[in-house]
Amino acid sequence: MQRLTISLDDNIAAAIDAFMERQGYSNRSEAIRDLVRDSLVRSEAGGTSTHRCVAAVSYVYDYDGRDLAMRLDKAQHENHDLTISSMRTRLDHRHCMEVTLLRGHTDAVRKLAAQTISERGVHFGQVNIVPIRDGGETHSHDDEGHHHDHSTPAL
């Protein structure tokens, strides 16, 4: 771990302190580390350099809007290799909120997330990408040969 010294103007320092209090951080270093990590991961050019990730894509959409629910579902089926699961809840008579979990190559996950969020009728779309270590550990827990991979975050 490296120690860095930075200078911040009073407004930014106060905003960080307010963020810490709202989020329950006990020190500035951890708060700033998480803010920087989040910013780098969200930046396509920066962040932890891995080829794989897991992601949560959340969005609100109009269920009655021009077969939108069917188009969103079709995109998930067409990308079944990326789609882990999806959960939907109805907000009112017209609107649903959906959260879709994805795992795969970071570029493909970003592309599907962007395609979903940019669909006409989708509102409040966000993606939370967590880089995972390439070449994750594979092992078994029993004598029957059950093997599985771990999606260990690349912190």
Image: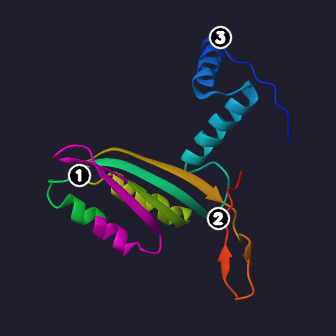
Residue segment shown in magenta: 73-98
Sequence-first disc among 3 and 2: 3
In this rendered view, identify the residue nearer to me: 14 or 21: 21
Instruction: Say left or right for 1 vs 154.
Output: right
Indicate which label's residue lies in the foreground, 1 or 2.
Answer: 2
Q: At x 62% / y 44%, what residue is drawn?
A: 40
Q: Does the magenta stretch include residue 147?
A: no
As displayed, is residue 10 above or below residue 92? above
Q: How far apart are marks 1 and 2 (CA)?
A: 32 Å
Amino acid, disc 3? Asp
Rendered location of residue 51, percent (x, y):
62, 65
Residue indicated by mark 1 = 120
Q: Which colour scheme appears in the figure?
A: rainbow
Please name whichever residue, 8 or 128, is drawn nearer the observer in this view of the structure.
Answer: 128
At x 23%, y 60%, the residue is: 69
**The N terminus - image quarter:** top right
Residue 77 part of the magenta-drawn span: yes
Position of residue 43 measured from the top left corner of the image (x, y, whole percent): 56, 46
Give the residue drawn at x 47%, y 58%. 110
Please state which of residues 130 and 119 is positioned toward the viewer in this rendering.
Answer: 130
The residue to which callout 3 is attached is 10
Q: State the residue position of label 2.
A: 151
Give neighbour class at mark 2: few <14, some 14-19, many 20+ (Cα, 10 Å). many
Disc 2 marks which amino acid? Ser
Q: What residue type is labelled 1?
A: Arg
Tag 3 and tag 2, C-beta contact below 8 Å? no
